Amino acid sequence: MSNVPPPPTNLRGAVDLSSLVNRPPAAAGGEAGQPAGGALTLPSLYFEGTDANFNDFIDLSMRVPVVVDLGTERSEQWKQFTPVLDRVVGGFGGRLVLVNVDVDANPQLAQAFQAQSVPAVAALVGGRPVQLFVGALPEDQIQDVFEQLLQLAAQNGVTDTVTVEGGDAPEGEAPAAEPVPEPLPPLHAEAYEAIDRGDYEGAIRAYRTAIAQDPRDTMAVAGLAQVSLLARLSGHTADELRAAAAEAPQDPAAQLGVADLDISGGHVEDAFDRLLTLFPKLDASGKEEVRSRILEYFEIVGVDDPRVGKARARLASLLY
């Protein structure tokens, strides 16, 4: 995961999670009375988190890392991304548990995890929140992030493994099946498969074809913006991009590079401010390049995000 900034481990919740930040770290051997690497039986690896029940998951994170998937039913990108997270978590053989949180329905958790744009992924380890990433990363990069999360968990003695029980269905009756997500449109599926392979150019072609066939395909527009960001960042390190921007403060290409980095790390306001401050100093060609990139960021962050509204108003004042 050399091209993605490592997940920070110092996020602290604003409300409801405040009680957990004062808890002592889990003991090196695991929770009191529990051996490290013990077995834990649960009805599933996948849960719905709410403001009302989240303390249960805080307690659970003392034994197994809990991945928190933050989104909203209004976000088609989140609906497409969550099955990818399901698959990756399932591939870790019970070493992780996934909790989905609808931030619209659970404002306290949205505030606690500072979920300013979705999809966003955080975690709980030993009762403490950890920010992981913002945006729909490809599957291989998610796996890398989760491997780092498990390393952090091991350092804190959180090493239990979940065994999924058969459920509470009556004898002779099969447990209720998990709902099957609707299949993606063919070109969207082609794009996702390309992203999983690291073939960003192939994903870009698929999304562009989808848009050409239906210019109102908002999911394809957002997907194109997201994968274009990944393609631009591929092969570059954070240090390289920040050094280039520092050496050439008036160079659009250098400033666009570090703005991409900020967006990928969730520093949305920093990216908008950087480019909108630079905008008046550019010639016509530079202004058009920056304007186009900002419009891409609007799709990545989400057009309903209040930070997008502010940036859109500021851009309009600069244009007119």
Image (spheres, rainbow, N blue to C red):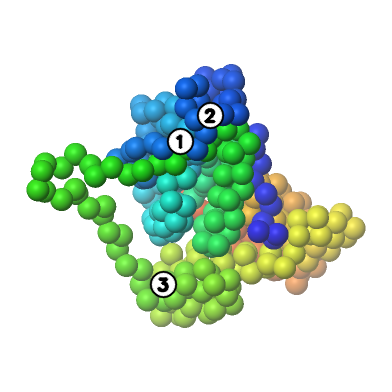
Marks 3/1: CA distance?
38 Å
Question: Which residue is found at the position 29% from the left and 63% from the top?
Answer: 182
Question: Which residue is found at the position 75% from the left and 72% from the top?
Answer: 285
Of labels 2 and 3, earlier in sequence is: 2
Residue 168 position within the rendered picture, expressed as x and y whole percent measured from the top left: 19, 39
Q: Quadrant of the C terminus?
A: bottom right
Q: Which residue is mark 1?
A: 38
Q: Which residue is mark 2?
A: 30
Question: Which residue is found at the position 58% from the left and 51% from the top?
Answer: 147
Farthest residue, direction right: 247
Of labels 3 and 1, earlier in sequence is: 1
Farthest residue, direction front: 35
Image-based side of 39 in relation to 316, left or right: left
Q: Amino acid at mark 2?
A: Gly
Q: Nearer the viewer, residue 211 or 27?
A: 27
The answer to whether 162 is drawn above or below residue 108 in the figure is below
Marks 2/3: CA distance?
41 Å
Q: Which residue is mark 3?
A: 189
Q: Nearer the viewer, residue 14 or 25?
A: 25
Residue 148 position within the rendered picture, expressed as x and y whole percent measured from the top left: 61, 48
Q: Amino acid at mark 3?
A: Ala
Residue 190 position within the rendered picture, expressed as x and y whole percent measured from the top left: 44, 76
Q: Amino acid at mark 1?
A: Gly
Residue 69 position within the rendered picture, expressed as x and y whole percent measured from the top left: 45, 45
Q: Nearer the viewer, residue 1 or 182?
A: 1
Q: Are marks 2 and 1 in contact (CB under 8 Å)?
A: yes
- The part of the image, by quadrant, that contains residue 137 is bottom right
